[in-house]
Amino acid sequence: MRAYVRSTLEDCVVGLAGDVDIVEAMNGFDALRLLPRGAFDLVITDINMPDINGLELIRFVRQSDRYRSVAILIISTQAAERDVQRGLRLGADLFLPKPFTPEALRDAVVACLDGRAERAADTDATELAGDAPPMGLADDVRSPPPERAPEPVTRTRQPGSGEEGGG
């Protein structure tokens, strides 16, 4: 699956985003080991991983001041509503259920990175105003724009919206 995701990203996203480095981790521990070695814009994780699962990885990333602004995309076969909501509540930006098309992966990655850019701009503006930056999730991407592939990506829960999920 990592090879498929990497190949898809190299074919679809690299052309859209310009200079992109893709780094693979073998498992959750490997991801934690690699994080301090670079400046990452996006972490793509599965829920099911050896050692440290994807939900534990998300929790670590979101609790760290250093990595809090990193966008997180979950791709997983474990896509029951309870699992989706749990991942989003922990701080993932989007959840893409397996199987997925290359276009759906590209759209999810672009949405995550766009959401990260918006959060960074909001954080900069908030810091200038002297307030603590709010933690937000990416905008609703359940219905992608018409020029994108029609495969749905599960939308995020907006803070304060009153939407609740199982967990």
Image (spheres, helix red, strand yellow):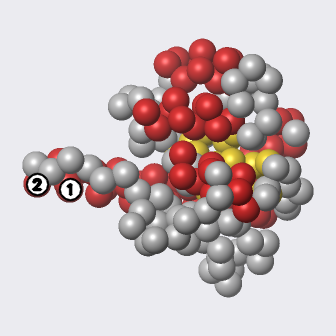
* Residue picked out by circle 1: 125
| Image: 97 above or below 149 | above
Q: Give the amino acid type for the residue marked by disc 2 in the picture.
A: Ala
On the image, the x and y values in percent for residue 112 come to: 56, 55
| Image: 134 above or below 4 | below
Q: Which quadrant holds residue 149?
A: bottom right
Q: Which quadrant holds residue 46?
A: top right
Q: CA–CA distance between discs 2 and 1?
A: 6 Å
On the image, the x and y values in percent for residue 106 come to: 71, 58
CA neighbours of label 1 inside 10 A, class few (<14), some (14 to 19), many (20+) = few
CA neighbours of label 2 inside 10 A, class few (<14), some (14 to 19), many (20+) = few
The residue furthest bottom is: 146
On the image, the x and y values in percent for residue 130 come to: 10, 49
What residue is drawn where x is 65% and y is 74%? 142
* Residue picked out by circle 2: 129
User: Do labels 2 and 1 touch, CB within 8 Å?
Assistant: yes
